[in-house]
Image (cartoon, rainbow, N blue to C red):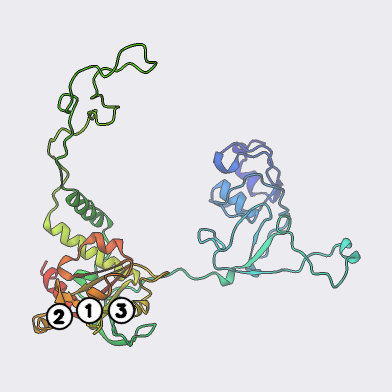
């Protein structure tokens, strides 16, 4: 029976369908001549391919290259919450992309076999993964991460950022963020994309490169060697493009090429607010009391960032925003930030410390985490909250 000729009445009947060479619905996965017999009970409104694969205990999107016969004469009991990987499918449960990631593997008792009586009782049984299916407990599947809904998301803790901080950082207070800056919902990824393209084009700037053509390269038109008699290739003057020191074929001619684009100021500010809202939605935005660490040693400053799981060998990237207010100008500062954290973090990988006036969408999206001081947060809300 052809694959497309299976009627709905045939699928609804409790029969065993043995399909021979299946036409390639998805040629990448189904181009094989060894299709296992499948037990079909109730298909409902689901697609034919997914229903057949799910009934056989196979993930709907799993590849079936060189598939072997899988015995599925009886439907599994749903009360047991057991997921089985057939032996013909090769999955690594440690891979995040597989549907078995994070699920605990269980060992079900094997069926009795007459050949096992002849074996030594003290011998350690060996599990052949090529012929033995693997079983997993579906109740141990981890729950997907969920975000805190608004407006509760805007209430964030103020963390300690000092040389005595420990992991996890100590909460020293709470603050309610501005919904204009950090409460954009839904997050407009199209605006973020437009602002990033605008920034990259602006950084590219203008191109004024110019190369010399064959008439501008220094050198005479004298023939460099005789036409015949030396066994070498014939050549004329010494300025051809394929010679060292020669001209450049089809090179830039000095015409100014402007790659910059225009974007409205309100769109750029909206993109910055949506980028900050996205970081708060991810849980990667941390508010600290102050960035005055009191030391410029990279080792000590790096230990503070380690408490936030930033930098180091296995840490993530971080974008630090700071602001030195007028009352603190007498203290040492560099480019509007505290000098100690600026100098101490200069040699830390994937850590960038800037003033809040330099906050941009490209750097916010590029770095995984954001650490912002209270003074920088106040300045940001005053500068962007007016819109």
Q: Secondary structure at mark 2?
A: loop
Q: Is residue 122 left or right of residue 335?
A: right
Is residue 159 visible to the viewer in this orientation of the structure? no
| On-image quarter of the N terminus | top right
Q: Determine whether label 2 and label 1 are within 8 Å by CB.
A: yes
* Residue marked by disc 3: 301
Looking at the picture, how far across and down is residue 48, in whole percent?
Answer: 57, 46
Mark 1 and mark 3 lie on one chain; the one further toward the N terminus is 3
Secondary structure of the residue carrying numbered label 3: helix
Image side of residue 344 versus residue 119, left or right: left
Residue at 58%, 71% in the rendered image:
139
Distance from disc 2 to disc 3, alpha carbons, whole Å, reads: 16 Å
Q: Position of residue 342 (x, y in %)?
A: 22, 74
CB atoms of marks 2 and 3 within 8 Å: no
Quadrant of the drawing holding the C terminus: bottom left
**Residue to which mark 2 is pinned:** 332
The tag on residue 340 is: 1
The part of the image, by quadrant, that contains residue 259 is top left
Q: Residues within 10 Å of mark 3 (few under 14, many from 20)?
A: many
Location of residue 294 by image quarter: bottom left
Instruction: Answer whether labels 1 and 3 touch (C-beta < 8 Å).
Output: yes
């Amino acid at each position: 029976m052809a694959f497309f000729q299976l009627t709905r009445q045939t699928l609804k009947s409790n029969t065993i369908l043995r399909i021979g060479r299946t036409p390639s619905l998805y040629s990448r996965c189904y181009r094989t001549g060894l299709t296992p017999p499948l037990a079909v009970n109730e298909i409902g409104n689901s697609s034919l391919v997914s229903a057949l694969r799910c009934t056989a205990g196979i993930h709907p999107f799993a590849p079936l290259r060189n598939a072997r016969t899988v015995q599925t004469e009886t439907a599994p009991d749903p009360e047991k919450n057991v997921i089985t990987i057939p032996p013909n499918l090769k999955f690594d449960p440690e891979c995040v992309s597989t549907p078995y990631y994070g699920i605990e593997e269980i060992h079900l008792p094997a069926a009795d076999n007459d050949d096992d009586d002849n074996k030594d009782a003290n011998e350690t049984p060996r599990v052949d993964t090529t012929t033995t299916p693997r079983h997993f407990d579906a109740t141990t599947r981890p729950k997907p991460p969920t975000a805190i809904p608004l407006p509760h998301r805007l209430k964030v803790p103020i963390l300690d950022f000092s040389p005595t901080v420990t992991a996890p950082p100590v909460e020293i207070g709470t603050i309610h963020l501005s919904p204009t800056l950090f409460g954009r919902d839904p997050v407009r990824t199209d605006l973020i994309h437009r602002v990033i393209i605008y920034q990259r084009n602006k950084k590219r700037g203008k191109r004024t490169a110019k190369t010399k053509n064959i008439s501008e390269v220094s050198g005479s038109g004298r023939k460099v060697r005789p036409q015949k008699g030396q066994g070498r290739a014939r050549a004329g003057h010494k300025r051809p493009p394929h010679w060292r020191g020669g001209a450049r074929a089809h090179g830039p001619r000095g015409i100014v090429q402007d790659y910059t684009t225009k974007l409205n100021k309100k769109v750029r500010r909206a993109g910055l607010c949506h980028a900050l809202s996205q970081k708060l939605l991810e849980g990667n935005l941390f508010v600290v009391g102050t960035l005055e660490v009191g030391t410029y040693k990279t080792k000590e400053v790096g230990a503070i960032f380690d408490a936030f799981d930033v930098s180091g060998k296995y840490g993530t990237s971080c974008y630090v925003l700071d602001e030195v207010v007028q009352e603190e100008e007498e203290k040492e500062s560099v480019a509007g930030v505290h000098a100690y954290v600026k100098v101490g973090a200069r040699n830390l990988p994937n850590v960038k410390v800037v003033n809040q006036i330099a906050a941009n969408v490209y750097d916010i999206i590029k770095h995984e985490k954001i650490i912002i001081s209270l003074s920088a947060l106040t300045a940001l809300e005053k500068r962007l909250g007016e819109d």
